[in-house]
Amino acid sequence: MAHEILHVFTHADNTIIGFVPQILLRPGYVVADYLAGRRKRYFNPFQFLLLVVGLAAAAALLLNYYDGTGVEMRQRFTGRMPAENLERMVAYFHYVGKYYNIWWLLLLLPVYALLTWLVYRKQGWNYAEAFFVHVIIGSVFHLLLAVVLLVLWALHTRALASSNIASSLQVTIITMYLILVGRQALRLSWGSAVWRSLLVVAMGVAVSVGLNYLAFHWYVFWAA
């Protein structure tokens, strides 16, 4: 993250200031231009994603977003499960926060790209193009998540992962921006853009919840 910040503010040809409103308001046009080879006008989307994922992770650390959740769960379930499992539960949420970047970038991003390719392949997208779509959408999500968490931290507002702020925002952003990309990049009708977006999100949520469930129960109970 520090390296990317240094790069952004020490290279004269960066356009990060202009890139933010472009992906917020015109994500489909950014996708269409980038896939058509018109890339010089844009800040590197992959660098931007790494930057905002790191920023969101840092904001979650400031807010004690994940570790605080583990402590709260330990208090809630004290006396209802063995002490060893309680401590592993706290450790689980600690690792979720610590390795959030890896979880999102190496697991959820490729999964959402695969699901998007399955739904949009008849519209001409290959897997790499679907992956790039989620680089843009993921950048928007993490940028807004970082802003929300930093505002909560500045206001001294207590927020935990159990409040589902991040997951609710993620579902909302992916749904809205897949619709925008469908409309702006593929020229789909509103109906076509909406049902495809909802299908991708529904499958993505099912996979994400399933993976979380398996990882949580394996670490807390089965591997104890």
Image (spheres, rainbow, N blue to C red):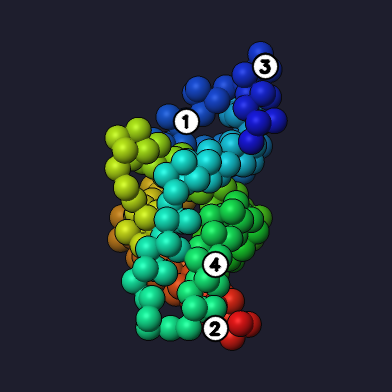
Which mark, by number, is residue 10? 3
**Could you say where residue 171 lies in the image, as x and y percent from the top left?**
38, 58
Q: Nearer the viewer, mark 2 or mark 3?
A: 2
- Within-10-Å neighbours for mark 4: few <14, some 14–19, many 20+: many
Counting residues from the N terminus, which is met first, the one under dot 3 or under dot 4?
Answer: 3
The amino acid at mark 3 is Thr
The residue to which callout 1 is attached is: 20
Mark 1 and mark 3: Cα distance apart in space: 18 Å
Q: Is residue 101 visible?
A: yes
Q: Nearer the viewer, mark 1 or mark 2?
A: 2
Q: Is residue 133 visible?
A: no
Q: Quadrant of residue 220?
A: bottom right
Mark 3 and mark 4: Cα distance apart in space: 38 Å
The amino acid at mark 4 is Tyr
Counting residues from the N terminus, which is met first, the one under dot 1 or under dot 2?
Answer: 1
The amino acid at mark 2 is Phe
Q: Nearer the viewer, mark 3 or mark 4?
A: 4
Q: Are marks 4 and 2 in contact (CB under 8 Å)?
A: no
**Could you say where residue 153 lies in the image, as x and y percent from the top left?**
37, 38
Mark 1 and mark 2: Cα distance apart in space: 43 Å
Check disc 4 and report its element: helix, strand or loop.
helix
Counting residues from the N terminus, which is met first, the one under dot 2 or under dot 3?
Answer: 3
Which mark, by number, is residue 92? 4
The amino acid at mark 1 is Val
The residue to which callout 2 is attached is: 221
